[in-house]
Image (cartoon, rainbow, N blue to C red):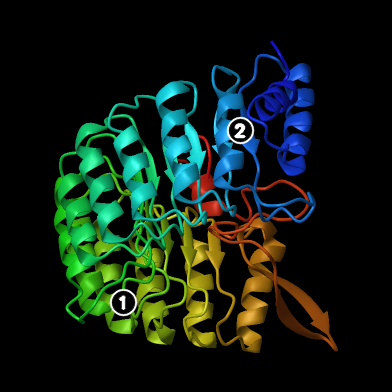
């Protein structure tokens, strides 16, 4: 088969366009990898925020030529062009690629200045597509117009398994539409509806998603960051979790949940046996909320594997209570506590858990060290979704230690 770099150069010269050195460098490396492992499937990774590869970010016109190169390439199963400038022009060619390249199962278009028109083109292309499993549209401002078309698409598409529409400026109308569609859709296993633009304090989004969770028995992963969710909203989700038997990963980080909300959550965790990963980061559950959780984890729950309470204004007593629950609950393997108020008892408790082997260093975001015979905790770059927005400059992109939520509850081949 002709090399990708040669085909790219041919299409550039045929259309009287300059080659983009950034694309050319990536395709040269990919050609080498294909030569070494000809039977494997590969992802074309042209991330615009990769600091190790200098070059101009790709535009819609660049993506047009790239998409022509990638057609009829059975070894290419994924395209990652995050943090570029392809815009609605590039979205048009991305839609064409989805129609003409049947081997693509993963498409990452996050933060590419795609607007409602580009969103419409991609959504319509997915009406007939039968191969794409995971689509990331994160950070493209497709707004209500584009979001409603994606919701309509889910009524037709029965193969897409994971859809990320976080930071897309969706409105309440979109959240309601997705909640309605997901009561019927039997394919979507993971959905991200982070940071919709909501007005008012009624927490309507949680009411509709709660109704959906009662009906849906396929969804495994749900992200609801920045929904302005308070205790009433969390109560709606908890009421649904009494009846839901499929959800394994719930992310309600960056909301307004307090210790009163933990009463509802602690109660549902006594009977829920499917939830494995719970992200409560950047709320305000405080010491009392941590104690409610620790009581349930000590005496009842034996299904939760990972808990994140990062930056929740929890003081020493609450953090120690959570550490004590790990001694009796041997299922809980990952706990993340950075950003709370550590006292010496907290530092000693987590140091003992790590030294005894009960808590593995890769499964928490703190590391003990000693100064003048006093133990302190420092932060370590581990977490449930540390590399959701960015990838590390060196080393493996998706290590289980830094993307523990996705490692424990894998939905699809990629993060």
Q: Residue furthest top?
A: 1
Is tag 1's residue or tag 2's residue first in the polypeptide sequence?
2
Report the mark closest to the observer, 1 or 2. 2
Residue 221 appears anywhere in the view: no
Q: Is 55 drawn above or below residue 11 in the view shown?
A: below
Q: Is residue 275 left or right of residue 85?
A: left
Q: Which image quarter: residue 362?
A: bottom right
Q: Is residue 152 above or below residue 256?
A: above
The residue that mark 1 highlights is 228
The reply to whether residue 351 is visible in this rendering is yes
Q: Position of residue 88 (x, y in %)?
A: 44, 49
Q: Dot 2: what SS?
A: helix
Residue topped by disc 2: 66
Image quadrant where one finds the N terminus: top right
Name the image quarter holding residue 210: bottom left
Query: Above or below — where is 265 with respect to 250?
Result: below
Image x and y of residue 193, in percent: 34, 58
């Amino acid at each position: 088969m002709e090399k990708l770099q040669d085909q790219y150069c041919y299409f550039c010269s045929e259309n009287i366009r300059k080659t983009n050195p950034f694309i050319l460098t990536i395709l040269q490396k990919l050609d080498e990898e294909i030569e070494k492992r000809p039977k494997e499937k590969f992802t074309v990774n042209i991330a615009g925020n990769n600091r190790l590869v200098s070059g101009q970010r790709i535009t819609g016109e660049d993506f047009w030529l790239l998409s022509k190169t990638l057609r009829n390439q059975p070894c290419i199963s994924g395209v990652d062009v995050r943090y570029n400038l392809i815009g609605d022009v590039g979205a048009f060619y991305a839609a064409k690629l989805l129609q003409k390249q049947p081997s693509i199962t993963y498409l990452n278009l996050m933060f590419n200045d795609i607007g409602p028109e580009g969103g419409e083109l991609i959504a319509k292309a997915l009406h007939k597509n039968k191969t794409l499993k995971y689509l990331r549209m994160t950070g493209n401002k497709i707004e209500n117009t584009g979001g409603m078309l994606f919701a309509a698409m889910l009524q037709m598409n029965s193969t897409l398994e994971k859809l990320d529409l976080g930071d897309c400026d969706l409105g309440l109308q979109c959240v309601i539409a997705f909640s309605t569609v997901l009561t019927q859709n039997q394919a979507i296993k993971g959905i991200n509806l982070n940071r919709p633009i909501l007005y008012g304090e009624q927490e309507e989004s949680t009411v509709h998603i709660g109704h959906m969770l009662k009906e849906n028995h396929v969804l495994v992963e749900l992200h609801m960051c920045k929904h302005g969710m308070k205790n009433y909203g969390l109560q709606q989700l908890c009421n649904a979790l009494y009846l839901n038997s499929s959800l394994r990963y719930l992310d309600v980080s960056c909301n307004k949940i307090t210790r009163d909300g933990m009463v509802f959550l602690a109660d549902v965790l006594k009977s829920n046996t499917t939830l494995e990963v719970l992200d409560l980061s950047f709320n305000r559950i405080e010491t009392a909320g941590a104690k409610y959780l620790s009581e349930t984890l000590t005496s009842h729950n034996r299904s939760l594997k990972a808990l994140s309470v990062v930056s929740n204004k929890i003081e020493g007593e609450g953090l120690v209570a959570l550490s004590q629950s790990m001694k009796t609950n041997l299922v809980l393997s990952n706990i993340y506590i950075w950003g709370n108020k550590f006292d010496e008892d907290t530092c000693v408790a987590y140091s003992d858990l790590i030294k005894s082997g009960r808590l593995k260093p890769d499964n928490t975001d703190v590391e003990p060290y000693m100064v003048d015979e006093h133990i302190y905790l420092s932060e370590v770059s581990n977490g449930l979704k540390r590399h959701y927005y960015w990838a590390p400059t060196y080393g493996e992109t998706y290590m289980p230690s830094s993307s523990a939520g996705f490692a424990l509850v894998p939905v699809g081949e990629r993060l």
